Image (tube, helix red, strand yellow):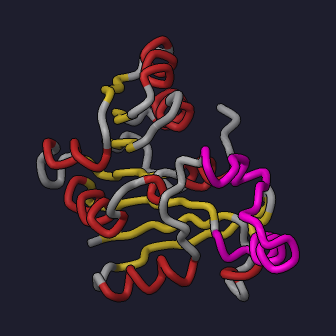
Amino acid sequence: MTLLRPDLQIIADNITPGSRVLDIGCGDGALMAALRDDKGCDARGLEIDPANVAAAVAKGLSVVQGDADTDLTAYPDGSFDYAVLSQTLQTTMRPDMIVEQLLRIGQQGFVSFPNFAHWRVRLSLLIGGRMPVTRLLPERWYDTPNIHHVTIDDFRSLVREEQLQQEGQWFLSGDTQTGRGLANLMAEHAVFLLRG
């Protein structure tokens, strides 16, 4: 069994064995390798960073270099059972359009993101008056890839506005799953499973 980051483990645990999966913003391919090795999935990836593409390909994974903001339109409708967007949504130019593409390409879509409304983030802004640097948000404001500061409640609102079906939701505080109550305040990370 492959050891994964907690949000990726939630995703892996909820993907049906043998599925076709597109991991958008796949990084070094850790999730794809786990799905291939542990669940017999046909996992493909799209990644913008050439070093990550090289690392994934070195693992024998099928990854192409590309940008989610411009390259998802090349994928046919319904070509995957699952499309995954893990810690990538907040780095895209138009997250709403990326979610639309995610659910056009995949029959179901996983989205995970750091929660910018977590109490530590709020406290850092309130007390220090500065953008926080945390374990899940380790970059400073000027070198972060995050261009949209999404919260759990913001994402839930997008799901309602777009009339998407929510198949599952999981919340993490540190590396531990936490309850849904007060998730917008208490969870550092969120994972949603959606269907269009």
Determine the residue located farthest toward the right in the rendered image.
127
Left or right for 132, reference 184:
right
Residue 17 spot, x, y in % from top left: 43, 44
Residue 71 spot, x, y in % from top left: 22, 42
Residue 53 spot, x, y in % from top left: 43, 23
Asked if residue 158 lies in the magenta stretch, the reply is no
Q: Name the residue: 15% across, 49% down.
A: 73
Image quarter in which the N terminus is found: top right
Determine the residue located farthest toward the top in the rendered image.
58
Asked if residue 123 lies in the magenta stretch, the reply is yes
Q: Name the residue: 38% across, 44% down.
A: 24
Write down the quadrant of residue 109 in the picture. bottom left
Q: Is residue 192 visible?
A: yes
Image quarter in which the C terminus is found: bottom left
Write down the quadrant of residue 193 in the picture. bottom left
Left or right for 122, reference 37:
right
Residue interval drawn in magenta: 116-143
Query: In this orientation, which residue lies closer to the viewer: 1 or 190?
Result: 190
Q: Name the residue: 72% across, 64% down.
A: 131
Residue 5 spot, x, y in % from top left: 68, 44
Left or right for 43, reference 176:
left
From the viewer's perspective, is residue 52 above or below residue 152? above
Query: In this orientation, which residue lies closer to the viewer: 119 or 101?
Result: 119
Write down the quadrant of residue 195 in the picture. bottom left
From the viewer's perspective, is residue 162 above or below residue 15? below
Q: How many marks?
A: 0
Query: In this orientation, which residue lies closer to the viewer: 101 or 164?
Result: 101
Q: Name the residue: 34% across, 33% down.
A: 44
From the viewer's perspective, is residue 63 above or below residue 6? above
Q: Is residue 43 visible?
A: no
